Amino acid sequence: MHIPSRRPDRPRSTARSARALLVAATLFATGGLAMPQVAAAAEAPAGASAERGDDIVGGLAEMLADATITLGGNDYPNPLRLQDGNAVDGPESWENVRREELLADFREHVYGESLPLPTEQTFDVSTSDTGDVVRKTVTIGVTGPEGSGSFDLRLFVPQGDGPPRGTSLMIDHRGSVGDDPGQSSGYAPVSTITGAGYAFAVIDANDLAPDDSGSYRDGVINLFHPSGRDLPDDAGRAISAWAWGASRAMDYLETDPDIDPTKVGVIGHSRSGKASLWAGAQDTRFAAVITNNSGSTGAKLARRGDGGVGAETVARINSSFPHWFPQTYREYNDNESALPVDQHELMGLVAPRRLVVGSATDDSNADPQGEFLAYVGAARVYELYGLGDTGLGSDDWRPETDRAHRGPAMSYHLRSGGHGLTGADWDVYLDGDLFSRAAAPAGL
Ligand code: GCU
C-alpha cells in the first residue's frame, strides 16, 4: 500500500504558519517590528499591545488552513484550504472560490477538459403509452465544430396521481436497457423503479464514446475533435464524455413537462459511477449523485494506492483502460501523492446536494475502505452547510454492513458481497427521498 506524506508543492501547515505569525506579532508587541497596518496600537494603553498582538495572531491564524486532513490515520489534501493558503470560511468562499479551484484541478490532472456546449442542440421525442408507464425515446441532436450527430435518451415515466417522486438518470456503459417498461434486472430494475413512483431515464455511454480503447472516438466525442489527429493531452476521454452526455440529457429533462427537474439524480455503477460522480460534481442541476462501487478514480481515495487489498491504482487503471482518462493523469502513475486533489474533494463538490455512495464488502478492486474514507472526508465540505452528518455514527472503518447510513444530505451503504449494482442496492436508493435536494438547516 502506498501511503503519501504531505503535498510537496503546497505551503506548510497552519501550525508552522501560526508560529511564524506568533514570532512576528511578538516582535511587534515588543517594538521589534514595524507593522504599519497595526501602527495605531502604539497609542493604546500599556499592556494592550500584547493583547492586541494576540488578537492579530488569533485572527490571522484562523484564516489559514492546514494543508492536510487525516483520514484513516493518513494525510490527504484539505478540501477547505484555498490555493492561497487561507481557509474556506463558509458556503460563499466555497462556492465562489474553492469549488472553482477544485474543478479546475480535477479537469487539469484527472478527468481532462470537458467537451464544450454544443453550438446547436435538438430534442426529437417519440412517445408511447403503455398503460402504467409512458415511454419516451428522445433523440438528442448535437452540433460541434466537426459536424452533427445524436444519441438517445430513454425515459420511463410512471402514470400516477401526481408527478413522479423524482427521476433517476442512469449512465449505462453496458448498453443493456431496452425499450420494454416491464424489463427488470438487478442492474436496471426499470419496472421496480417506476413501480416505486420514480421516473427512470437512461443514456448509453457508448453513443458518446464507445468503451473501447481502439474505437472510443467513434461517438459524439468526435464532433468536437478533428478525426485523424490525436486528442490534446489534457482533453477528457471516455469518462469525461459520458459525464458530459448526462448533462446534455439533463438539458432535455429540464424541458419535459412530466419531469420535475429539481428532483433528478444521476446514477452510475462502477466505470459509470466514476462518470456519475464527475457529472454531479460539475453540474449543480443534479439534486443527487449516486456512485455505486465506483472504485479507482471514482469514490476511492487515490493516495491509498492498492489499499493493501490489491485494489486498482492510478497506474493500473491508466494502463488497463487507456481511453478513460487524459494523458495528464498518467503523471500520477505510482505517484499519487503528487496529485493536487483526492477523491474526497470530488465528493465534496456535490455539496450541499445529496451524495450517495454504495460500496460492497468483497469489491476489493474498488477498495471499499478507500471509498468509505473518501465519504467521511467529504463531510468536511458538507459541514459548511450544517449538513455534515454522515449517518455513520463513527468515522472508523468498518461500518455496519447492509444498512443505509443516512444523514440529511449524505448517504452510504456497504452491501455484503461482490462488485455489482444489485436489487439490494436499488432497495437503498429507492427508499426514502434520495432524489430530492437536501434541505439546508434553518438559518443557512
Ligand atoms: C474494472 C475496472 C474498474 C471498473 C470496473 C467496472 O474492474 O478495473 O475500474 O470500475 O471494471 O466498470 O465494472
Image (cartoon, rainbow, N blue to C red):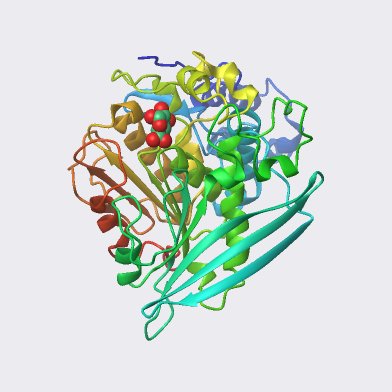
- Find residue 29 and report its image quarter: top right
> Is 112 left, or right, of 91 in this rendering?
right
> Is 148 left, or right, of 177 in this rendering?
right
User: If the picture is divided into quarters, which one holds ligand 1?
Assistant: top left
Q: Position of residue 346 (x, y in %)?
A: 50, 40
Q: Quadrant of the N terminus?
A: top left
Examine the rendered structure and indicate whether residue 369 appears above or below residue 442: above
> Is 188 left, or right, of 15 in this rendering?
left
Q: Residue furthest right?
A: 145
Examine the rendered structure and indicate whether residue 394 appears above or below residue 229: below
Q: Nearer the viewer, residue 401 or 64?
A: 401
Examine the rendered structure and indicate whether residue 251 appears above or below residue 47: below
Q: Position of residue 81 (x, y in %)?
A: 56, 35
- Asked if one can make out residue 46 in the rendered structure from this viewpoint, the answer is no
- For the point 64% across and 42% down, the residue is 219
Q: Nearer the viewer, residue 387 or 375?
A: 375
- Find residue 111 and report its image quarter: top right
Q: Position of residue 184 (x, y in %)?
A: 31, 58
Q: Nearer the viewer, residue 444 or 21?
A: 444
Numbered circles on residues, count: 0
- Asked if one can make out residue 136 in the rendered structure from this viewpoint, the answer is yes
- For the point 21% across and 35% down, the residue is 398
Q: Residue furthest bottom?
A: 161
Q: Position of residue 419 (x, y in %)?
A: 29, 36
Examine the rendered structure and indicate whether residue 53 appears above or below residue 201: above
Q: Nearer the viewer, residue 25 or 120?
A: 120
